[in-house]
Amino acid sequence: MQHPLSEYPRPALRRDSFESLNGPWQYAFTKAAQFPTAWDGTIRVPYSPEAPASGVGRTLQPGEWLHYHRGFTPPAGQGGRVLLHFGAVDYACAVEVNGHLAGGHRGGYWPFTLDITDYLRPGRNTLWVAVQDPTGNGTQARGKQTLTPGGMFYHAQSGIWQTVWLERVPDNYITELTVTPDYDARTVTVKAHTAQPGGAKNLWAVVRAGGVTIAEDWGGDEADQDGEVTLNIPEKHFFPWSPDSPFLYDLTVGTTQGDEDGFDTVHSYFALRKWSCEPDAKGILRFCLNGKPILLNGLLDQGYWPEGLYTPPSDAAVVHELEQVKELGFNLLRKHAKIEPQRWYYHCDKLGLIVWQDMVNGGGKMNQWYVTYLTNALLPLLRHTPDAKPLWGLLGRETEASRESYQTELKATVEALRCHPCIGCWVPFNEGWGQFDARAATAALRALDDTRLIDEASGWYDQGGGDVDSRHNYFYPLRIRPGGRTVALSEYGGIAWPMPGHEPPGKTYGYGTAKDRADLTKRYKMLQWKTILPQLGRGLSALVYTQLTDVEDEVNGLFTYDRAALKPEAAAVRSCNAALAAEFAKATAK
């Protein structure tokens, strides 16, 4: 397949046409930033050179440059502006068009756009992207990537790993939509941001439900000078979003500027749903969706693929995996230390899968002896260890620049993903990795987005803030006591089994190892029935089993790394999930 992942990459801000630049590019590894004098071969974008699917099979080392080059023809049409979009490039890059610097970007997980109109020429044009990625030698967000993979840390990847595409837009185009549904008020507020100041004064918006227009505003008195309108959702068309009924409203937004170059129309969607923590009939705080208690029952999802590493093999493969998760009776995925391409969240929106979204961890080199081993061994004593200034060095946040980078990354994450109704909770820190002043991170998240829950410190280094009393438990007896926050078991399980034909290339990693499928199924059932189910009545309200799939040496997934096989018996997994749901309903019944 020459042009992989050819679907429109940004469903929440969609125009009628685009031109994908995925496919074969020239590439070269060099020690210098200058344009290469020769090319090493062809790379298949958007797969990183470390991924087998790229056709390269080489790791970008700290200090090296990875160069991409290709020709292109601007999108059909005349006038307006031509935009060059990158879904994500890991980590830092500079972009030249026809020998002119068009811009650059830092941050390996976030999208960026360059206006390349002024650098174009008639006919064939050239595009050059130069990339550096220090991986573990820097302080930038990097998740579980490492140059020395093993255990719970995986192969590094670099360069272009999400779709690259072109769009021709009007001179004064919509750059961003801020869509704010209000479940209680039965409204949706739409704010359009445009390329030119005041360009969205004459904003119009149309809401459709199942193809039927239910609300519209055509730039009358309700549109203010900043381009903001609020539309009312009629009661007969009020369809709350939930895992059982993931209803999405279609949204079309446009601007009218009085001349053809000023027109722009984009398509999006939204959902009406509300998250809260409220006491059940016994006074125990529970997670509530749309005012009703809900058991959040899910899996830890690393987002790695054997052929593509961070990049899935196809859109269909993503949908198939998410559908399997739903079919097994889960309603939640905790996206762990990674941000996915926009289409992944779009499919969760459509299918009704709730997402707990981790911020991608970074900072200096992690002192694993302290952050992981000592704390885990002495967890009952150290779970609430402070994350104040004297410990920032141990937690990998010694430098001011690193802490400022995290704040920038946190804001970029919310801005990139807030449009997706599937996201129910932000997780600023995991197990102390790169953690500092978690209370301040929670305050920043509240200011950016007060519509979602916050799991301030997943696992340990818990500072008592946020909405979630978040526990990781692999080795200790599980004892739940209700308190001032809702209790989540945000990691547990992790039973390993190297399924024959799917053994890891290195040492097997997991938390206890099963002998065969029958043994794995038995252990899984006992864990759910004997350990988890009795705690639901005592306040346990969310579960995240480790994990969705095997990843490299870590073979504790429910599915094999290639997604070819479910390791425990499917009927056993479904019956456990049904029993947990029934017990939770009984525990929270009025």
Image (tube, rainbow, N blue to C red):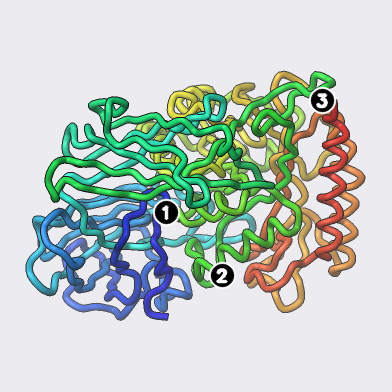
Mark in the foreground, 1 or 2: 1
Mark in the foreground, 1 or 3: 1
Residue at numbered disc 2? 306
**CA–CA distance between discs 2 and 3?**
40 Å
Percent position of residue 213, x then y: 44, 45
Give amino acid for label 2. Pro
For the residue pair 474 and 113, the one nearer the viewer reads as: 113
Residue at numbered disc 1? 11
Give amino acid for label 3. Arg
Q: Is mark 2 on a helix, strand or loop?
A: loop
Please indicate whether residue 217 sits to the left or right of residue 294 in the image.
left
Give amino acid for label 1. Pro
Q: Earlier in the sequence, mark 1 or mark 2?
A: 1
Q: What element carries label 1?
A: loop
Residue at numbered disc 3? 481
**CA–CA distance between discs 1 and 2?**
26 Å
For the residue pair 66 and 541, the one nearer the viewer reads as: 541
Percent position of residue 79, x then y: 11, 57
For the residue pair 218 and 505, the one nearer the viewer reads as: 218
Please indicate whether residue 463 sits to the left or right of residue 389 in the image.
right
Percent position of residue 435, x then y: 52, 33
Q: Is mark 3 on a helix, strand or loop?
A: loop
The residue positioned 16% from the left and 38% from the top of the image is: 196
